[in-house]
Image (spheres, grey):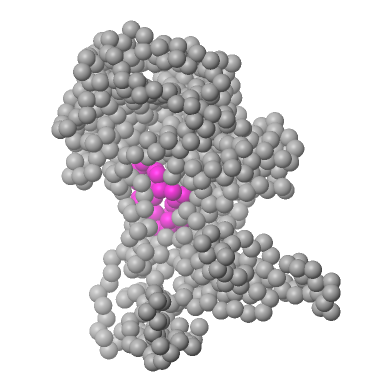
């Protein structure tokens, strides 16, 4: 460790121990025989000790003008060479020890006076005179690639683990070379997050420490699981610390809770794969592979299986949330749906109240209502064995207003008739995607109708006919495929995630089909060329079924009357085209809901509000919301008053929040 620090101070790399001659077969940058001059900004030092003890420390040259943990994104002018500070600072620590796995757990054990010495368990020690030793408990080398496992022993894997922790636990500020990647990690390229610092967390304890430090200093905190927020909540200039949970992505069965534990940074496709391959179960979450579960479930979360199984939040048994009190003291609270739990309201708020409002969700526990026993294969829904997937592609030629009215009207009216929980089509998830005309190289497609349904549902062919009855445009039919459920889920995710770039999104729940006037408004804007986007669309998706059997007050997900969810979306690449493309999306949405003030007011005109996981600041802007109905009514309906009380109790210092955040009441 001393050599590591001095290497930074003196801009010198010391000789590598043992090697005396360069080896052309070795691709490592080692230094045989003689030290060499080289500016070194970061050094990782890993040490080993008895009992499997491993430690790692990252030392970093301070940025010019300030500390790596507090520096602003704008670099200060360099000091004159004669006065430049020549020191190294510790910026990350990793520990794997018998009395604690992870630096936070180890340090807490040290402060408690725990030694970590105990009976040997890694092998049978009954034949040895000494049966006590130090072992690192609970260590699983799940971060080591399968290629390296046969090439490494346990001690080496422990070294890799602590090195990883040391590198990940650093604060990243504007002068850190990784800052730019963290700042631009968000999915929507309209926004970057230029906070004073990032904290890439790997444990709940690290989140508690980061929140406590920020709260005591009066700094606003934002949380990011995967960076899929469609508004600039993380990049708000008021945010001083971004806690990134992407490395907290474990999925495991917790026998104590009799539930499946999933950390907030776990991405949906990884969750689906682990649940399906390990226990044959799933969750009714969304289609995108790369959306993380943290914010998705906090906003309710729905997807292709929700008509059969409800929204994802309906299956949350418990949630762990890091909160801060009025004094700035942070702590982790586990809240469950048990009626006698004193923290139950905090659980309720995270079943549809939206992310970033009350604290940092570090993990959920999932167990379906009514599930009993301790077998994880029986605690969550089982997906279909096979899925029938089909699509109809409608050409633009011949798709006039009358044809569009018929196509969109059929879709809505079918869902009005077939969205009860007992419907034979409750296993069906369908979508109708209407495409905007491109200025150049338009592919000639006006719409695609797709379906995913359990292969056991009868009359699939007849169902497709009913979707398209009376439409004067003959579709191209690629065919119906029967594939394993996970394969169909992967293919749906691939199409869902195809669009990348600068984006704007709006949403609307519908209780009834769109009217002819509304469909005409869609046709007018989709058929125009007053935008330069590469992917302007209006997508109608199946809703209802089991979702609507749950009372609106049972969870914070208030929208329990809709049969269709509509997504208005525009994607483009050129920053100079922002105003043009955002303007187009605003106009088509405003005109579609012109009779209710430009927004889908719940209970008026067949609408039922908006989906909080597709946040849209225009809902709070009187220029675009002229309904007189506040934004929170659109997103939360009657549940907002209760959410305000919970906000006041659990975030009294308003450490968390954003422009569409719950206000304390």
- In the image: residue 476, left or right of residue 343: left
Compared with 273, 94 (above or below) is below
Q: Tell me what residue is drawn at x 21 percent, y 46 percent.
A: 575
Q: Nearer the viewer, residue 569 or 271?
A: 271
Q: Quadrant of residue 60?
A: bottom left
Q: Is residue 413 among the parts visible in the rendering? A: no
Span shown in magenta = 219-243
Give the residue furthest to the top: 470
Q: Nearer the viewer, residue 639 or 100?
A: 100
Compared with 2, 408 (above or below) is above
Q: Quadrant of residue 158?
A: bottom right
Give the residue furthest to the left: 440
Q: Tell me what residue is drawn at x 27 percent, y 34 percent.
A: 535
Q: Quadrant of residue 578?
A: top left
State the image coordinates of residue 291 (x, y, percent, origin top left).
Answer: 45, 43
- In the image: residue 441, left or right of residue 267: left
State the image coordinates of residue 458 (x, y, percent, origin top left).
Answer: 53, 15
Give the residue furthest to the front: 25
Q: Tell me what residue is drawn at x 53 percent, y 52 percent.
A: 249
- In the image: residue 535, left or right of residue 463: left
Q: Nearer the viewer, residue 661 or 489?
A: 489
Q: How many marks?
A: 0
Q: Tell me what residue is drawn at x 38 percent, y 46 percent.
A: 233
Q: Is residue 274 among the parts visible in the rendering? A: yes
Q: Which is the main secondary structure of the residues drawn in magenta?
A: loop
Residue 238: say if magenta: yes
Compared with 655, 465 (above or below) is above
State the image coordinates of residue 655 (x, y, percent, origin top left).
Answer: 48, 52
State the image coordinates of residue 505 (x, y, percent, origin top left).
Answer: 33, 35
Residue 190: say if magenta: no
């Amino acid at each position: 460790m001393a050599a590591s620090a001095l290497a930074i101070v003196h801009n010198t790399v010391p000789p590598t121990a043992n090697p005396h001659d360069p080896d052309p077969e070795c691709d490592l940058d080692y230094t045989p025989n003689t030290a060499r001059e080289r500016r070194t900004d970061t050094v990782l030092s890993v040490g080993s000790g008895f009992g499997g003890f491993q430690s790692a420390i990252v030392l970093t040259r301070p940025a010019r003008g300030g500390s790596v943990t507090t520096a602003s994104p704008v670099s200060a002018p360099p000091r004159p060479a004669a006065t430049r500070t020549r020191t190294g600072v510790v910026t990350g620590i990793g520990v794997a020890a018998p009395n604690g796995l992870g630096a936070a757990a180890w340090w807490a054990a040290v402060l408690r006076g725990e030694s970590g010495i105990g009976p040997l368990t890694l092998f049978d020690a009954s034949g040895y005179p000494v049966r006590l030793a130090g072992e690192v408990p609970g260590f699983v080398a799940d971060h080591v690639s399968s290629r390296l496992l046969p090439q490494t022993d346990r001690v080496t894997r422990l070294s890799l683990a602590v090195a990883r922790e040391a590198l990940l636990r650093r604060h990243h500020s504007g002068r850190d070379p990784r800052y730019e990647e963290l700042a631009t990690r968000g999915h929507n390229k309209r926004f970057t997050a230029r906070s004073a610092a990032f904290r890439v967390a790997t444990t709940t304890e690290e989140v508690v420490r980061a929140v406590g430090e920020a709260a005591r200093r009066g700094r606003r905190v934002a949380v990011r699981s995967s960076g899929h927020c469609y508004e600039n909540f993380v990049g708000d200039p008021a945010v001083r610390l971004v806690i990134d949970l992407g490395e907290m992505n474990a999925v495991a069965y917790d026998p104590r809770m009799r539930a499946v534990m999933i950390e907030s940074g776990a991405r949906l496709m990884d969750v689906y794969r682990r649940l399906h391959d390990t226990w044959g179960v799933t969750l009714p979450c969304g289609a995108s592979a790369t959306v993380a579960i943290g914010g998705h479930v906090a906003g309710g979360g729905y997807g292709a299986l929700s008509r059969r199984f409800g929204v994802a939040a309906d299956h949350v048994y418990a949630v762990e949330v890091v909160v801060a009190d009025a004094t700035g003291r942070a702590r982790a609270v586990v809240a469950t749906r048990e009626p006698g739990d004193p923290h139950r309201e905090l659980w309720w708020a995270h079943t549809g109240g939206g992310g970033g409002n009350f604290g940092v969700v570090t993990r959920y526990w999932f167990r379906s209502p009514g599930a009993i026993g301790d077998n994880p294969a029986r605690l969550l829904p089982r997906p279909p064995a096979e899925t029938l997937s089909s699509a109809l592609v409608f050409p633009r030629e011949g798709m006039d207003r009358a044809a569009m009215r018929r196509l969109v009207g059929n879709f809505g009216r079918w869902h009005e008739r077939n969205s009860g929980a007992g419907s034979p089509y409750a296993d069906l998830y369908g979508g109708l995607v209407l495409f905007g005309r491109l200025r150049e190289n338009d592919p000639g497609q006006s719409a695609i109708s797709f379906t995913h349904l359990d292969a056991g549902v009868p009359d699939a062919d007849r169902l497709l006919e009913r979707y398209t009855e009376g439409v004067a445009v003959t579709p191209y039919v690629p065919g119906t495929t029967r594939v394993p459920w996970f394969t169909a889920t992967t293919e749906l995710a691939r199409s869902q995630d195809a669009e990348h770039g600068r984006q704007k999104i709006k949403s609307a729940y519908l209780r009834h089909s769109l009217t002819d006037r509304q469909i005409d408004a869609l046709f007018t804007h989709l058929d125009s060329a007053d935008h330069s986007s590469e992917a302007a669309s209006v997508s109608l998706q199946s809703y209802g079924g089991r979702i609507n059997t749950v009372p609106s007050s049972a969870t914070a997900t208030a929208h329990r009357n809709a049969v269709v969810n509509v997504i208005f979306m525009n994607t483009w690449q050129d920053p100079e085209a922002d105003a043009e493309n955002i303007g187009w999306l605003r106009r088509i949405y405003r005109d579609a809901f012109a009779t209710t003030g430009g927004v889908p007011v719940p209970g008026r005109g067949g609408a039922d509000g908006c989906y909080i996981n597709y946040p849209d600041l225009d809902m709070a802007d009187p220029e675009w919301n002229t309904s007189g109905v506040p934004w929170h009514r659109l997103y939360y309906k009657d549940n907002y008053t209760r959410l305000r009380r919970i906000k006041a109790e659990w975030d009294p210092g308003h450490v968390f929040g954003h422009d569409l955040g719950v206000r304390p009441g």
